[in-house]
């Protein structure tokens, strides 16, 4: 049962359906989860990160840092699920 569940989660992560994203900026508390998906899609296409953040109207340095440094950790978390 456990292996089947882990396999499903891994398949979803490969499709990009599951990811632990920051909901709010850790410093100022602004909600940034709404732009995370578009940001990562555009970055993966090869666009300049600074220009993408400007176009998404993310101006504060703390919010920009949070989006730029967020890492997909779901593979690490899956190892420790029940």
Image (cartoon, rainbow, N blue to C red):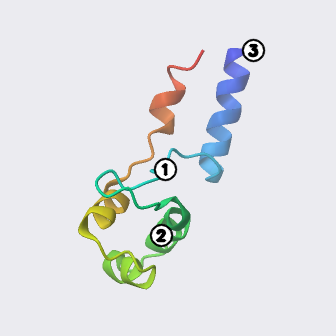
Q: Are marks 2 and 3 in contact (CB under 8 Å)?
A: no
Question: Which one is earlier in the sequence, the residue at label 1 or at label 3?
Answer: 3
Look at discs 2 and 3 and give the one toward the viewer: 2
Determine which quarter of the picture holds residue 52.
Answer: bottom left
At 65% from the left and 35% from the top, the residue drawn is: 9
- Residue at 45% x, 46% y: name it: 72
- Residues at marks 1 and 2, CA–CA distance in whole angstroms: 12 Å
Residue 82: x and y, percent? Answer: 60, 14
Residue 39, compared with residue 76, is above or below; it is below
Q: Nearer the viewer, mark 1 or mark 3?
A: 1
Q: Residues within 10 Å of mark 3 (few under 14, many from 20)?
A: few
**What is the secondary structure assignment of the residue under circle 1?**
loop
Could you say which disc has been placed on residue 47 in the image? none
Q: Which residue is mark 2?
A: 39
Query: In the depicted view, which residue is nearer to us: 81 or 23?
Result: 23
- Residue shown at 50%/19% (left/top)? 80
Disc 2 is placed on an element classified as helix
Q: Residue 59: percent from the left, percent from the top?
A: 32, 77
Q: Quadrant of the N terminus?
A: top right
Residue at the image position 56 percent from the left and 20 percent from the top: 81
| Residue 45 vertical placement versus 20 (above, below) | below
Mark 1: give few (<14), some (14-19) or many (20+) Cα within 10 Å.
some
Label 2 to label 3: alpha-carbon separation: 35 Å
- Mark 1 and mark 3 in contact? Answer it, CB < 8 Å: no
Which residue position holds label 3?
1
Which numbered circle lies on residue 21?
1
**Distance (Cα) linking label 1 and label 3:** 27 Å
The number of numbered discs placed on residues in the rendered structure image is: 3
């Amino acid at each position: 049962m456990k292996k089947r569940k882990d396999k499903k989660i891994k398949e979803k992560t490969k499709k990009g359906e599951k990811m632990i994203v920051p909901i709010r900026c850790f410093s100022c508390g602004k909600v940034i989860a709404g732009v995370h998906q578009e940001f990562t899609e555009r970055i993966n296409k090869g666009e300049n990160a600074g220009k993408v953040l400007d176009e998404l109207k993310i101006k504060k340095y703390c919010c920009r840092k949070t989006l730029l440094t967020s890492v997909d950790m779901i593979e690490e978390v899956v190892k420790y699920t029940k």
